[in-house]
Image (tube, rainbow, N blue to C red):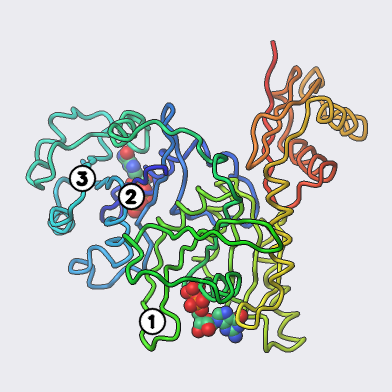
Amino acid sequence: MKPTLVLVGRPNVGKSTLFNRLTRSRDALVADIPGLTRDRHYGHGRVGDKPYLVMDTGGLEPVVKDGIMHAMALQSLQAIDEADKVLFIVDGRQGVTAQDKIIAEQLRRKDQKILLIVNKTEGMSAAVVTAEFYELGLGEPYAVSALHGDHVNELAALALAEFPEFEEAQNEHRYPKIAIVGRPNVGKSTLINALLGEERVIAFDQPGTTRDSIYIDFEQNNKHYTLIDTAGLRRRGKVKETVEKFSAIKTLQAVEDANVVVLVLDARSEISEQDAHIADFILQSGRALVVAVNKWDGLDGYQREVIKRELSRKLSFLGFAKLHYISALEGTGLQKLVLSVDQTYVAAMTDLSTPRLTRALHTAVEKHAPPRGGMSRPKLRYAHQGGSNPPLIVIHGSMLDHVPETYRRYLENFFREAFDLAGTPLRIEFKVGH
Ligand code: GDP
Ligand code: GDP
């Protein structure tokens, strides 16, 4: 599992600026997809061979008017408990404030390692600017400038120092791993129970720590799968249901560890910001995706039309994904959903030979050549596959740095059709030859 860094601090200290810095490399991949949420809270980053997840707690919940006492809202406190490392950001230009002290006090009570980050220190002496922050009692402060990027890489390396390098164990698992994710009450547990039938064994009261998902092997039509259950176990048939707290980190980790993600939405409520954030994160992760619009039972034709229209407008950026209207409660649409999961898994894991890819590349270029960049036209010579889940297609040639984004999209769609890669994102990389 990739370590998760959680950013905390009062408003305006530079959390989202730092977040953007820490996730920059991966962000470029999804930067200009229309409809994506601008204001991002979850992201990926990498220093050297160490990938990590970052979560910005800023703006996770509406700002409480009486902000001092509620310096940190519930969701942030939960994220802190579940983090691998907490980065507490303060403002070097403002010095220690009352709100910083309150947050520090809450953090000191936690059984968590905190890294104290003094931001906005460009052009200042680190020793001088950090001196007063020792009083927060969180150890040695570390000076950065998120805006200028000063010491941000070193900071990431420091935050990850004790975590081992990541090895790609993703495909060693025997069965396709399917994560069922979505915000609370969309019907994840009901769906999982419906998929598992009556066989589900309810063995524990306590599903481990709050951030761990539960892995359940199941079989359907002689195929094996492992479901990653982010909703947590519920005792069926008991009056008392365990109350689920939505865990963003659990969701992020589950998405990362899955081959295919089933994003569950609730047909009876509007697509919310939380839905959009989760969708955005799935997209960034590159995982294959099937969308399940749940609670489709009991709606009339008119309501269904309205919902369909809203979904296609708001989810246009998930265009590559298959979408199913289901009722987890009544068990309708589930067979087709599982079929799509199968197809999507096959697409995500596809293995394309260099000759096949190169032939397709040449056909694509014949149909529609890349536009000239300056004096010369990019030459696309051959393609090979550089990875799977998501499939990565590496194109070799010359002048490839002149290939515009629109042409990259054209190729992506071309390959998607040529090789029937529905349901999985596709990455295209241009290898600039010399
Ligand atoms: P958040 O509310 O904690 O997420 O803070 P933001 O990232 O939105 O930053 C608040 C303000 O501080 C913005 O105007 C940023 O441009 C500015 N800011 C962030 N980092 C730095 C920095 O390293 N140096 C300076 N001078 N300003 C910064
Ligand atoms: P979770 O928090 O995402 O795991 O959601 P649950 O599975 O606990 O479901 C939340 C509520 O929605 C429960 O009251 C379910 O009975 C109800 N529910 C789940 N699926 C459906 C469905 O397909 N149709 C209807 N009408 N209600 C559903």
Of the residues shown, which amino acid type is indicated by label 2? Val
Kind of residue indicated by mark 1 = Glu
Q: Quadrant of the N terminus?
A: top left
- How far across and down, in percent of the image, does residue 379 sit? 81, 20
Q: Circles 1 and 3: CB distance less than 8 Å?
A: no
Q: Residue at x 73, y 61 (%)?
A: 339
Q: Which residue is mark 2?
A: 6
Nearest to viewer (mark 1 / mark 2): 1
Residue 241 has which mark?
1
Residue at coordinates 9% horizontally, 41% vertically from top-left?
A: 134
Mark 2 or mark 1, which is nearer the start of the sequence?
Answer: 2
Where is residue 95 shown, x and y percent of the image? Answer: 16, 45
Q: Residues within 10 Å of mark 1 (few under 14, many from 20)?
A: few
- Decide if ligand 2 comes within 8 Å of the CB at mark 1: yes
> Can residue 96 be seen in the rendering of this structure?
yes
Local SS, label 3: loop
| Mark toward the viewer: 3 or 2 | 3
Above or below: residue 393 compared with residue 278: above
Q: Which residue is mark 3?
A: 113
Give the image location of residue 73, x and y in percent. Answer: 28, 66
Query: Is residue 156 toward the left or the right of residue 287 in the image?
Result: left
Q: Is residue 293 above or below residue 108?
A: below
Name the element at disc 2: strand
Mark closest to the chain's N terminus, 3 or 2: 2
